[in-house]
Image: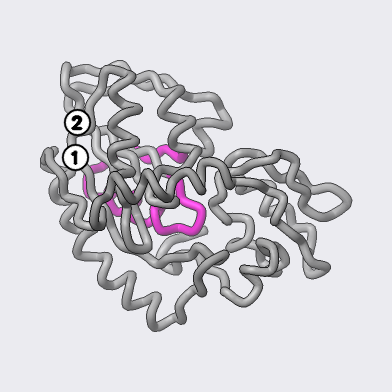
Amino acid sequence: MIFTFSATGNSKYVAERIAATTDDRLIFLRDAIRSRSYRYQIGREERVGFVVPVYFQGIPSILRFFLEKLELTAGSKEPYIYVVFTCGQWTGDAAGQVSALLKKKGLSLSAQFAVTMVDNYVPAFTVPGEEEISRILDEAEAPIDDACRVIRARGAGDYNRCKGPAPALQTAAMYPAYAHGRSTKPFVVTDHCISCGLCQEICPCGAILISGGKPAWIKPKCVHCFGCLHRCPAQAIHWKNASEAHGRYYNPRVEK
């Protein structure tokens, strides 16, 4: 089984590629949490994968929440568990966070991988143009193929080449900004909103409610995934004034 979370399609694309290679079932964290599905039986030869983006060189809050709730009944003493990160540049010690959470369950991380994808953190960066997006996605194919091959063979080890210098120090320095800065207050909605309700539907933590025809953020914090912003068909959702001119992104090689 492969657990995945993807706001802009990058991790979804990688997860679907792995699932097609290994014939493993795909489970979206948003759906699992909504249905409160936290207990899973692992077959003796079954692989367990987590394919998620990296935020501030750490793991998304939705993955942390899920791992804290997760109950795995393994058919073997040492189940094969791996993580694949999608990132704009570095992953830091995100795998260390996953490993620590698994350890609390009496489980261990068998392998880690990383794939550089299109960076779409629009509060700080501008989404690249179509040609640059195509180049980045083309270059991602080889590491995805490599990960698929190793995972299919249940290869163990550290295959992450995107950790960056001093990964533990990077994560220690940057991740607190994510853990304590996921406020929903900076989200704003313009009059371009068409009241389609997509933002409410896709929000992984139920932080959005359509009220008076427009989205309202009803929780003080969210996953900080910006799925609502990127996928708004009218580009009516912004993050303060920082995202307005930075573009929108969804992986063009995956279905929304």
- The label on residue 149 is none
Near mark 2 (Cα within 10 A), the count class, few <14, some 14-19 or many ≥20, is: many
Which residue position is annotated with label 2? 80
**In the image, which residues are magenta?**
5-29
Q: Secondary structure at mark 1?
A: strand
Label whose residue precedes the other's in the sequence (1 or 2) = 2
Among the 4 quarters of the image, the one containing residue 141: bottom left
Residue 19 visible: no
Q: Residue at x 18, y 22 (%)?
A: 44
Which residue position is annotated with label 1? 111
Q: Would you place residue 254 above or below residue 220 in this image?
A: below
Say which amino acid is labelled 2.
Tyr
Tell me, yes or no, whether the two marked residues, 1 and 2, touch with CB atoms within 8 Å.
yes
Residue 76: image x %, image y %? 17, 18
Near mark 1 (Cα within 10 A), the count class, few <14, some 14-19 or many ≥20, is: many
Q: Secondary structure at mark 2?
A: strand
Residue 182: image x %, image y %? 59, 46
**Residue 16, magenta (yes or no):** yes
